[in-house]
Image (cartoon, rainbow, N blue to C red):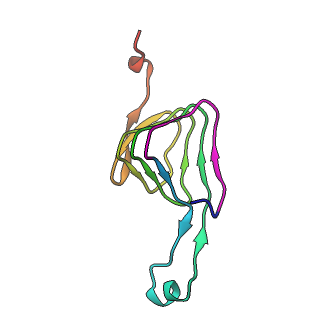
Amino acid sequence: MDGAPIVIGTHCFIGPNCGMYTANHPVVAEERNMGLEQAKPITIGDHVWVGADVTILPGVTIGEGSVIGAKSVVTKDIPARVLAVGNPCRVLRPITEDDRIR
């Protein structure tokens, strides 16, 4: 849902069933019933890996080189070069040289 821009950087991996939603509906019932809505952009930095079944909510920025674990619900900004998982998604730790396969 793209009522606002969704910007995806270069060399990103995005798993299946990932949802990015820019629409933000009011929590006050009267405003919602009036049809009020706002959209907030989503920004995904370069070299980000978004796992399968991840949900990214309005206004979120995911920093360069970060990894978002499968089934996470990203409700707030995620800094660069971290591993983040969960519902709500939270930073577990920085990505370091120890994470290299070789």
Image vertical order of residue 30 relative to residue 78, above or below: below
Q: Quadrant of the N terminus?
A: bottom right
Q: Residue at coordinates 37% horizontally, 39% vertically from top-left?
A: 69
Residue farthest top in this picture: 102
| Left or right of residue 77: residue 68 | left
Q: Position of residue 20 (x, y in %)?
A: 52, 53
Occupied quadrant, residue 98: top left
Occupied quadrant, residue 38: bottom right
Q: Residue at coordinates 60% horizontally, 29% vertically from top-left?
A: 11
Q: Position of residue 23 (x, y in %)?
A: 55, 66
Occupied quadrant, residue 40: bottom right
Image vertical order of residue 88 relative to residue 83, above or below: below
Q: Magenta stretch containing residue 13, yes or no?
A: yes
Q: Position of residue 19 (x, y in %)?
A: 47, 52
Region rendered in magenta: 4-17
Q: Magenta stretch containing residue 65, yes or no?
A: no
